[in-house]
Image (cartoon, rainbow, N blue to C red):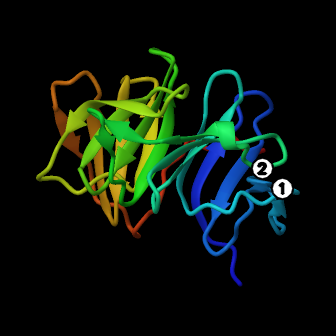
Amino acid sequence: VPWIPTSVAVSPVDGTIYAALAFKDRLATMNYCGAGVPTLLPAAHKKSLCGIGFDSEGNLHGVDGQVDQFLTFNADGSLSPDKIKSLTFMGKTLNVADCGMAYDCHEDRLLVSDSGSAGIYTVNPADGTTTRLADLPAELLGSGLEYDSTTKQALSCDQTSLLSIAIDGSNDFTKLADLAEPADDLVFGPKCN
């Protein structure tokens, strides 16, 4: 089975790259700057992950897009029942399609994008409730997400579409040049020597 990352996140603690992989029920760490096979974490999560991301304390979170759950992983990659929350918006299940996750370092909040609703949300890790920050139903976005700390905007992709989006409720956005290839996720990678 091939190694197909569907979402990646960089640990703010030590710079380790973590990946959710298609067709695998375990997270992997990867040597971003070198060759080699990803290393699977010891424990299975048994979820269908569409996005993963770290918070400022180094806790790794994820979204299961098949059952619309917000997850907080244990260090070994497993999930405890108390770390699985229903993902909700305005009291109802947020029906997630493809998604992405990122961390907004200026506002200290986790961001989740959803291609089905063409929205970007902030999520409360304690209970899985979300608040919509951007709503762009006419645009193609949501399968990948990254926070751009220089512009304080979200970057989101879906297929080859790439947008820079204000996450202040204004729904302002800029359509950027199309990507050369379809992408599932976006992340600023570390500098390699």
In front of the other: 56 or 46: 46
Residue 175, horizontal then vertical, whole percent: 21, 47
User: Can you identify the residue that label 1 sits on?
Assistant: 41
> Which residue sits at x=34%, y=66%?
159
Residue 19, horizontal then vertical, whole percent: 67, 55
Q: Alpha-carbon neighbours of circle 2 within 10 Å: few (<14), some, or many (≥20)?
A: some
**In the figure, 158 relative to 37: above or below?**
above
**Number of numbered discs present?**
2
Distance from Cα at disc 2 to Cα at disc 1: 6 Å
Residue 128, horizontal then vertical, whole percent: 47, 34
Q: Which amino acid type is marked by label 1?
A: Leu
> Which residue sits at x=39%, y=29%?
122
User: Can you identify the residue that label 2 sits on?
Assistant: 77
> Which residue sits at x=46%, y=24%?
149
**In the figure, 16 relative to 152: above or below?**
below
Which is nearer the N-term, disc 2 or disc 1?
1
- Whether residue 16 sits left or right of residue 126 in the image: it is right
